[in-house]
Amino acid sequence: MLGGAHPAIGAVLEAARPETTLVHGIHTAPPVRPVRQNVVLLGDAAHAMAPNLGHGANTALVDAATLAASLHGAGGGTRAIEGALRRYAWARTVPGQLWRLGSETMLRLAMLERSAPLRDRLIGAVSAVTP
């Protein structure tokens, strides 16, 4: 029973049946530009990702800190703010999209059905050589 986890978890898993279980697909989002005119996207709005890397909230926090740093001291002028938003977009587009692509790749790997044994061997081999 899940290594002694809460008994209610085991009861739910025991009661689960394929014919009474609703399964939804997981979809990924296409890449987007995080800044367009005076609209700034942060977090999932800028780079929605599958949950399998566990990095979505971290990426959103880095987005917020980067935007704050870019705007800090920009002044109130339109050109200064536009420059700050360009700096934010330059700093966050590639890292955010790399996390999004990484999560999509891991999602596809995790969802393989026909090649599940190969996937499992590959994951086992990678985990054997990583700390």
Image (cartoon, grey):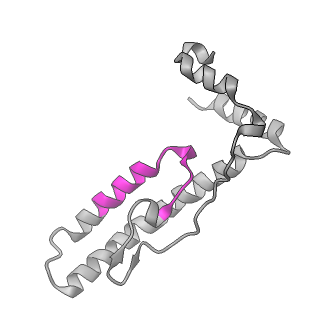
Residue 30 lies in what quarter of the image? bottom right
Nearer to us in this view, 53 or 74: 53
- Residue at the image point whose x is 55% and y is 21% from the top: 8
Residue 80 x, y percent position in the rendering:
21, 82
Q: Is residue 100 left or right of residue 116?
A: left
Tell me if residue 82 comes above or below residue 25 in the rendering: below
Tell me if residue 40 comes above or below residue 119 in the rendering: below
- Residue at the image point whose x is 36% and y is 84% from the top: 37
- Please give the range of residues in magenta: 47-66
Residue 42 x, y percent position in the rendering:
38, 64
Nearer to us in this view, 122 or 108: 108
User: Farthest right residue?
Assistant: 114
Residue 24 x, y percent position in the rendering:
66, 51
Residue 13 x, y percent position in the rendering:
65, 26
Confirm whether the magenta stretch covers residue 57.
yes
User: Farthest top residue?
Assistant: 4
Residue 66 lies in what quarter of the image? bottom left
Confirm whether the magenta stretch covers residue 127.
no
- Residue at the image point whose x is 76% and y is 37% from the top: 18
Report the predominant secondary structure element of the magenta stretch.
helix
Quadrant location of the N terminus? top right
Tell me if residue 57 comes above or below residue 123 in the rendering: below
Quadrant location of the C terminus? top right
- Residue at the image point whose x is 57% and y is 45% from the top: 52
Q: How many marks?
A: 0
